[in-house]
Image (cartoon, helix red, strand yellow):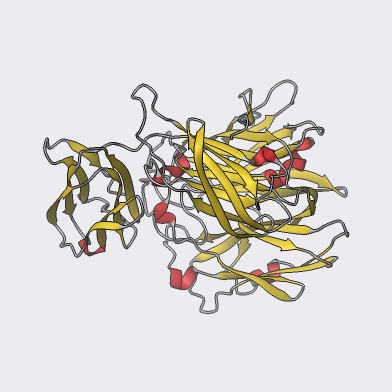
Amino acid sequence: MIKNSILFLFVLFVLSSFKTEAQNSIVRQDSLFSHIILINGKSEIEKLNLLPETSTLENLFLEVSLVNFKQSKNFIQNPVCIELERNINGKTERLEIARFFLPWFDKETDTKALFTFDISAYISLFQQNTNLYIESNNTKESIELNLHFKWKLGHSSAKINRIINLWQSGIKGFTYIDKNNSINKQIENKTITVSKEIKYALLKIYLSGNDIKNQIPKEIDCSKFYFLNINGKTVATRPVWRDDCSLNALFPQAGTWNHSRANWCPGQALRVFEHFIPLGADTTLSINLHLQEDVKKTSRIQSYILSANLILFEKAQYRNDAAIVEILAPNKSFNHNRYNPICGSPVIRVKNTGSDTLRSVLIEYGLNKNTNNRYRWRGELAFMEEEIVYLPPLNWYFYDQNNKPNEFCVSIEKVNNKTDEYEGNNVLTAVFNLAPVYPNKISIHFYSYKAAEDNILELVDDMGIPLFEASDFVSDSTYTFNLNMLPGCYEFIVYDKKGDGLYFPNEKNGSIKLFNTRTKEELKDFEPNFGAEIRQQFMILK
C-alpha cells in the first residue's frame, strides 16, 4: 500500500530589489528571491544559503521559467548558463549546474517555457553561503526569469565526498575553428587522486556547439563525437548532436526551431552527458576528453561551450533500494505535453539506488490513491542505472461523474523480492488530465499543401497495434477518412519525415482535423507547426 505521501518542500523566492548591475543580494533570514532580470546578459544572487548544514536531502531540483524577453529579429543561439561560485584552497571557481537555450519568438512574449534540472549532486554546495551566477550571450535585451528550488527531505543513495571542476570554458566556449589553436589543446588532461573511501565517480559533461549566427548546421559537417578516456582506455564515445529538436515540448516556435543541432535546441534544457564510473581499486584517475577535429574545415560550429564536474561518492547507503524517479505519463506537466493526456499505459522511470544489482521491482499503482494494480518489472540495473517502465493500462473511465480521477499514484513494494531498505524514494504522484472521449464514428480531414510525401497518418490501439495507416499523399490535395471504432483506447498520430510538420513560413499551411462523422462537430484541430509528429490519445466508450 502507498505510504503517506512525501510532499516536496520548496522555497519560493520573493523579489526584493536589484543592484544597478542586476545583481540580487540575498540574506536567508530576511528575504529570498525568485524573479531575476538579466541585464547585459548577466545577473547574480549573492550569499545564497538554501539549507542549514543539519538538513539531509534526498534530492534537489531547480525549475526555471521564462517570464519575458524580446527576441531579436535574427534568430540566434541564446544559451543561458547557471553557475555556483565557491572558494576552494584559497581560489575562487565557478561550477556550472544548469544550461538551457532561449526559445525562438519574433516578438516580446510571455511563454510557458519551463526548464527543470536535477541538481541533487550539488546539494552540499547549497549548505553554505554561495553566489549564484546566471549568464547569457544575449547582451542587448533584458531577460526575466523565475527560479524555483524544490527539494525533498530524506537520504541520498550515497554520500558525496568531493566535487571537482575539471573544465570550464565560459559562455563563449573553446574555439573550434581556429587553425592555430586546436580545441583539444584547450581541453587539458586531468589527473585526480582519490582516497580509498571513494567507491564511485559521476562525470557530468555540459557540452554544446556554438553555431555561426543565422546558419543551420548540416549534420554531415557539424555532427562530431567526443571520446572519453580514463586511465588510457576509451570508456565512452558520444555524438555532440541532437536530432530530436522537432519533438520539443515547446511548440510552435518561430524560425527553424525544429532543425538538428550540436547538442542544443531552441527552448530546451541542455542534454547533459553523464558517465558513472565504479572505481574499484583505482586511486588515480587520468581523464582525457577528446573532441573530433574538423579535418575538412567545413564545420559551421565556431566554438564549444564546455564545463565538466566530477562528483566522488562513498559507498552506497543501502544494498536493496530502488526509486521512482519520474512519472512521464499520465502527467499534466508542460514538459510532458507531447505524450499526454493518455488512456493507455502509464509510463515511469525507475532507478537502482542500492549497491546490489536490481533484478525485479514489485510496483503498485492506480488513480486517486487507489493503488490496487500490480506489476512486477524484471531486468538488470547496476547502481545508479535507470530504465523507463511501461505499466499495464488502467480502466481510466470507470468512475462516478462527480468524482473524476485527476491524480496518478505509483509506489514500490518489493525490491529483488525483499523489503526495500529505504522507503523515502518509493512513492510518487502526478496530477493529470483525462484523455478526451470521442464518438465511435469519426472523420479525419487532411489537407496537404506541400511536401505531402513526407506525411503519414496512423491509428493504433492501446497495445500499439496499427489499425489504420495512410501515406503516399499528393500535395495540395484534400483527403477524408471515415473510421468506425469499437469501445477502447486509441492513439492518432501524424508523422512528418523531415520534421517540419505541415507548416510553411509566409505561405498557407496544411491542416489535420478530427470531426464527429454524424454531427460534423469539430473534435480536434492540430497545430500545423508540430515538428516531427503530433499525437492524440482518446477513448471510445460506446
Q: Is residue 205 left or right of residue 294?
A: right
Q: Is residue 35 visible?
A: yes
Q: Is residue 11 left or right of residue 529?
A: right
From the top left corner, tell me how far across and down residue 440 is, in percent. Answer: 20, 42
In the depicted view, which residue is nearer to us: 93 or 206? 206
Position of residue 411 relative to residue 227, above or below, is above
From the top left corner, tell me how far across and down residue 371 is, in percent. Answer: 51, 36
Q: Is residue 269 left or right of residue 228?
A: left
In the depicted view, which residue is nearer to us: 125 or 266? 125
From the top left corner, tell me how far across and down residue 522 is, in percent. Answer: 18, 37
Position of residue 154 relative to residue 415, above or below, is above
From the top left corner, tell me how far across and down residue 83 is, in percent. Answer: 67, 45
Q: Quadrant of the N terminus?
A: top right
Q: How many marks?
A: 0
Q: Residue at x 30, y 36 (%)?
A: 436
Q: Is residue 143 visible?
A: no
In the depicted view, which residue is nearer to us: 407 or 39? 407
Q: Quadrant of the C terminus?
A: top left
Position of residue 473 relative to residue 111, above or below, is below
Q: Residue at x 74, y 40 (%)?
A: 155
Q: Residue at x 34, y 58 (%)?
A: 499
In the depicted view, which residue is nearer to us: 436 or 231? 436
Q: Is residue 397 left or right of residue 35?
A: left
Q: Give the residue furthest to the bottom.
A: 296
